[in-house]
Structures are given as structure tokens and as C-alpha cells.
Image (spheres, rainbow, N blue to C red):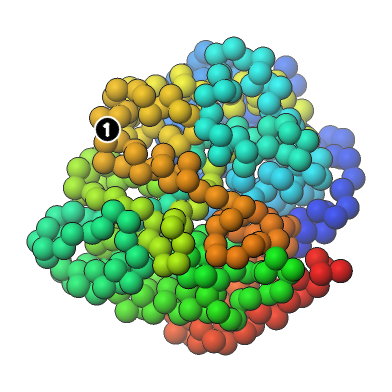
Amino acid sequence: MASTRYALIAGAAATALLATACSGAGAGGSSGGGKSINVLMVGNPQMEDIAKLTKDNFTEDTGIKVNFTILPENELRDKVTQDIATQAGQYDVATIGAYEVPIWEKNGWLHDLGSYADKDTGFDKADLLKPMVQSLTGSDGKLYALPFYGESSMLMYNKDVMKAKGITVPERPTWQQIADIAAEVDGAEPGMKGICLRGLAGWGELGAPLTSMVNTFGGTWFTEDWKAQVNSGGFKEATKFYVDLVREHGEAGAPQAGFTECLNALSQKKVAMWYDATSAAGSLEDPASSKIAGNVGYAYAPTVKTDSSGWLWAWSWAMPKTTKNADAASKFMLWASSKKYENLVGEKLGWSRVPAGKRASTYEIPEYKKAAASFGDITLKSIEGADPANPGVQPRPTVGIQYVAIPEFQDLGTKVTQEISAAIAGKTSVDKALDDGQKLAEEVAKTYQK
């Protein structure tokens, strides 16, 4: 698969910096001062919003034309890895996350963006939430990406369904409680399933909620001394729980369901609950696209053995070193992550749709506080409480809650989740999927055990 090929490119380049960007690898900008830039971004609602607002606002004000390429999450990861790792130079700006930043920074693939932010007096870098800044900072202490929106994870549910069934969802539920509720509300309305959990293969798709579950079940991908744990202990227990829950009470077509599909499933009353990113709340509360707007309940990420289990992520703007339009690209990124842009979204599209989770000041805006009254506090506390260094019950060899911060994880996580997705589809067993995954993880571990 393409994802495997590009992940191998990134992994190899992580240990040996690729050659300097090829001359002539233009980024699509015009020859007249970089008045046109190419932006590659994931196809989440917040990105679709900025694509709609850019022309009449940013371009109108600056004269800089922005050409957007919007892709589903897995395709985005493949494309951005290919472009940046091979130094192709097709894009001036790309959305990446906390996983990529420290790895790609060490390879010299990214521009330092902190210096641009410091020079922009209106940007207010000090207002960015500390967990977001820390996750996007390189080993040299410089900021290599600007957060567009930040997120942890939480449980979201249809309050009307719970009320009709006489169910009170705990604010801090356990996974067993959620499984019991899913069984009870399965079929509560015609065609409605109990819960949506991602079943689409991908280290950042199925791998994100599953790994957060593995942590709280007491499992880990690797021990502190790099012993693979994929087919044992809490990893196996969590995976069997996850697969059984999806197969028994999960969404239709689960092996093809990622973030977008689950968002649609809950908002269109096809499922009663969903565990996923806190950033989904804004879309769920938008009456223009959600049938349950105003009737959504929120709870902290379910736990088993840990006090919390929410992940930490920021879809962020990064600038490849290959760009020939650094000035124009930096102006776009600063605008896209600014207070001014958040207010623009609130005024034009509705305050629930503000790309939040990155600035402390967002949670003090009266209009946003009102729109986010049901989910804002849980979101902020989940982000602030996430601990990438200690997400489970045992020491880890690297940081990361829903991922392992090594270059090889992009390939490893994708291959293992492909097997687990097949188990959800009934094409293999969980034991076989994890035994195969253990072999792959052991090969990765050898590199670090040496």
C-alpha cells in the first residue's frame, strides 16, 4: 500500500537527512513575490471552514491566493509524508501533528515558526495553551508548527436517547459502563446502533482511540526497555474489548468508518454514542449539519486502570523547508491560528465552530463560552490533563498517548490496525491479528534495543 511505502521513506530519512531540496521544485507560487501558495490539509470540518473563508478575508486583505488540497486523514498522511520526506516541494504549508513535528524537525525538514510568531505582535504566542506549544516544539526549543485547533478525546452521546431509556451517563465513565450502555441503547431508534468507534485502518484512525484504550487497560506497545507487548496483557485485553464492542453494538460498515464517518453517524442519529476527538463537538452542535444539535451530552474519556485516558493532538500548520514562498506562507499560518480568525469563524459561521483547543483566551470569549457551555470545560480540562510522558500504568520508552513517537510507528501502527480492522470485519481473529502485529513490533524494537 501507498501508506507503507511512504512510511518507509520517512523512516529511512529519519536516520539520515535527505539531500537538500531539489532546485526548481516549485511550490506553486507565482514568480511575482510569492503571491500564491499551496496548502495541503486534512478534510476535517474546521479545514473545510477555512477553505470557505480564505478568499474573501485573507486573500482580500493580503492579495495572497491560497490553493487548497483537502484529503481524508489517511490520504493526507501519505501525501504530506511523501512530499516532505522526499523534499518534493509541492506544498508551502501542510497540516501535521504532534507525532510528526519532533521527528521531522530533527531531520531539518521544517521551518522554525516561532520566530515569525514572535515578530507578529497581534498573534500573542503566549496565549497558546502550554500542552499545544510543548507538543509542537523541537529538541532545540523552537516552535515548528502553529496549532490550528487542539484536541483531547471524550465520549459524546445523544441525550434524548439516554433520557428515553432512563440512563444517566457518568461524567467519568469506565469502559465497562460504556459497553453496558451501548448494549442497552442498541436499537433504541430504528436503525440506530449503540456506539461508533473507528474501525478504519490507520495509525491515526483506528490506532488513536484503540491505543488510548490500550493505555487505560494497562497495556502498551513497548515496555521501557523496548520489549514489544502487542499480543499480551492489557494490549490484548483492550483490543478484544474494542473489537467485541464494535462487532456487537457498533456502527454499520465499521471497517470503513473513521472520524468523518462516526461524526456523521452520531449527528444523523445512526448511533447513540461516540468516543473520539473533543474537536468534534463544534460540528455536533451546529444545527445546519447535525440533527442532535443542542441535545448532545459529553463525558470524559472512559477509563479502566488510569485516572484519565484522553489523548492529546493538535492539527497544526507547518512550513516545509522546500517552500519558495516562506513570507506568504507564514502570513497565512499566522492568520489561520490567530484570535482574529477565531472571531471571524464565530461571527460568520457560528461560535460552536470556532477551531478551539489552542488558546486560553478562546475560553473567555462570552459568545464562545455560551456556545460551548456543554463541552468547553471538559475539552479544556482534558487537554490540560493529558500526560504524553505517562499515559499508562508503566514507564514508556518514548512520549505519546495515542502513538509511539518513533519514525517507524507510522508504518507499524498502520499495519497492525489493518489486521485489527480485518478482525472487526470478521476476516481474521484478534489473536491472529495481534500475533502478526507482535512480530512486526519486535522487528522495530530490535533497532532500539541495540
Question: Is residue 36 shown left or right of residue 279?
Answer: right
Residue at (45% x, 67% y) in the render = 305
Badge 1 element: helix
Q: Quadrant of residue 45?
A: top left
The residue type indicated by label 1 comes to Ala
Residue 54 image offset from top left, x and y in percent: 49, 26
Question: Is residue 177 shown left or right of residue 80?
Answer: left
Q: Please name whichever residue, 256 or 419, is drawn nearer the observer in this view of the structure.
A: 419
In the image, residue 327 sits, relative to residue 370, either above or below, namely above
Q: Quadrant of residue 249?
A: bottom left
In the image, residue 313 sits, relative to residue 161, either above or below, namely above
Residue 289 image offset from top left, x and y in percent: 27, 44
Q: Disc 1 designates what residue?
A: 371
Q: Please name whichever residue, 81 or 370, is drawn nearer the observer in this view of the structure.
A: 370
Does the rendering let one see residue 345? no
Quadrant where the image shows the C terminus: bottom right
Residue at (70% x, 51% y) in the render = 81
In the image, residue 254 sits, relative to residue 345, either above or below, namely below
Residue at (66% x, 79% y) in the render = 438
Residue at (59% x, 81% y) in the render = 231
